[in-house]
Amino acid sequence: AIIIPNSTQVQDLAAHRKMVFQDLENLYQTREINELIHKEIERINKSLAPHEQIKFFRLVNDEWTTANGMLSQTLKLRRAQLNKRYEKLIAAIYP
């Protein structure tokens, strides 16, 4: 799964834990943030069927909007554009 975290919440969490980071991209790559997100995913996965569960994920500092073509005018994911944009990342997650 490609996850776009709530940047404000992640920054607040990092500040609370006195984490040092250069930018959001750097922060999203830290082991501590990834472990916290992983724990939350595991908690949510318990209420999901096996085929619905997130097994692998990456955090990205991005926005999906109608302006950048990642969402349709009705706010649906434009999967072809997302697959093209994240082709290498998806290949790294699911080799």
Image (tube, grey):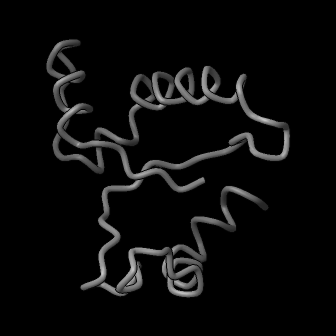
Q: Is residue 44 left or right of residue 74?
A: right
Residue beneath the point at 30% across and 66% down: 63
Image quadrant for the C terminus? bottom right
Locate residue 91 relative to residue 26 in the image: left or right: right
Q: Position of residue 76 (x, y in %)?
A: 47, 75
Q: Is residue 8 above or below residue 4?
A: above
Residue at 61%, 27% in the rendered image: 44
Q: Quadrant of residue 47?
A: top right
- Pick the residue in front: 75 or 56: 75
> How far across and down, in percent of the image, does residue 83 sit?
59, 79
Q: Quadrant of residue 11?
A: top left
Residue most extreme to the front: 74
Q: Is residue 3 above or below residue 43?
A: below
- Pinpoint residue 85: horizontal percent, then vertical percent: 48, 80
Report the residue at 39% width, 74% height from top. 75
Q: Is residue 64 above or below residue 79?
A: above
Asked where in the image residue 52 lies, by quadrant, the reply is top right
Q: Nearer the viewer, residue 86 or 65?
A: 65
In the current view of this chain or complex, which residue is farthest to the right?
50
In the image, 3 versus 22, the foreground residue is: 3
Q: How many marks?
A: 0
Task: Say which residue appears at 74% left-offset and 33% top-offset.
Answer: 48
